Amino acid sequence: MPSEMSWKQAIVHVLREEGGPLHYDTIVERISEAQLRSSFGATPAATVASVISTSLKNDAKPPFERVEPGHIRLAGGGSIAALPKDDGGADDVGGIVSAFGMYWDRSYVDWEPTKPRLLGQQSKNSDEVDFSDQIGVYLLYDRREIVYVGQSNEERKNSCIGQRLRLHTNNRLRSRWDRFSWFGLNPVGKGAANHLLGIGTAAGQKGATKAIIDVMEAVLIEAIEPRQNRRQGDYFRGLEYLQVEDPQVAKKKLIQALQSP
């Protein structure tokens, strides 16, 4: 087995080891655990989905078959003689909510810059992405209680989610929240690196985008109950990003610890 596999080779290897169907997210986790790849990009689950879709569409005898939405297994019960060649699959994401983050920690963000960074990654080995320019809706929490629902859209000046959240660190809500969640319409761009957020189909359609955000905000305001438990549907699998602490925050904590008596 080669030390560095293509995405298709790695997917086939994981499915063969499993002997049954797996979800795209689980496939990414297994590839990471087995160290089959050193590079994962910013959206590894979307890459797995794209590689599989490309194979099913273009290969004369695809090594995969879908058993239900988001779940895949090896064709023919896993009896594949050799690992396939690299197909060069690329990221492909879609839908209204293209990325989201749940219950992120306010203290992980350096709020001093005019434009703070909201860093996240899809999995342990994937590239970090800065979601500060995201548009959509967000929730503020006091411990686990939702205290405020807001929105960010391109029609307002300086109204990206990062800047909206920074505003709430200085206005009447400044002492009333310690965590936040966000649901964004702009997807992570292909090959996004260096903390960059790709601008997708959500941008450039201001009327439609604003209407979608208004509806999302209204539904959340009307439907959310205090201390409501989070329930993640299958549609959201592969879209969540886990927060990454801004290195500047970690640096400041270290300096403070060294200076403490």
Image (spheres, rainbow, N blue to C red):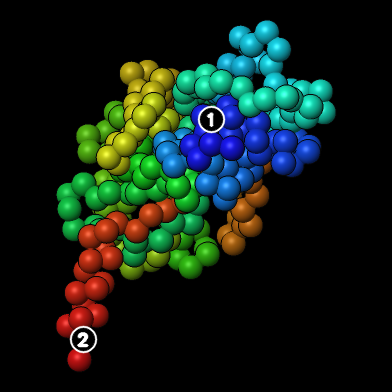
* Residue occupying the point 40% across, 65% down: 178
Image height check: is 234 above or below 51?
A: below
Q: Secondary structure at mark 1?
A: helix
What is the quadrant of residue 245 in the picture? Answer: bottom left
* Residue occupying the point 58% across, 60% down: 226
Would you call the spot at circle 2 few (<14 residues within 10 Å), some (14-19), or many (20 or more)?
few
CA gap, disc 1 and disc 2:
48 Å
* Residue occupying the point 74% across, 30% down: 73
Apparent side of residue 249 relative to residue 90 in the rendered image (left or right): left
Mark carried by residue 260: 2
Image height check: is 226 above or below 32?
A: below
Q: Nearer the viewer, residue 218 or 54?
A: 54
Residue 232 percent coordinates (x, y): 63, 46
Would you call the spot at circle 1 few (<14 residues within 10 Å), some (14-19), or many (20 or more)?
many
Q: Amino acid at mark 1?
A: Trp
According to the picture, the residue beneath numbered tag 1 turns out to be: 7
Q: Nearer the viewer, residue 179 or 126?
A: 126
Q: Nearer the viewer, residue 80 or 28?
A: 80
Q: Amino acid at mark 2?
A: Ser
Q: Nearer the viewer, residue 170 or 126?
A: 126
Is residue 183 among the parts visible in the rendering?
Answer: no
What is the quadrant of the C terminus in the image? bottom left
Mark 1 or 2, closer to the camera: 1
**Residues at badges 1 and 2 in contact (C-beta under 8 Å)?**
no
Q: Residue furthest right?
A: 77
Sequence-wise, the earlier of marks 1 and 2 is: 1
Apparent side of residue 158 relative to residue 219 in the rendered image (left or right): left
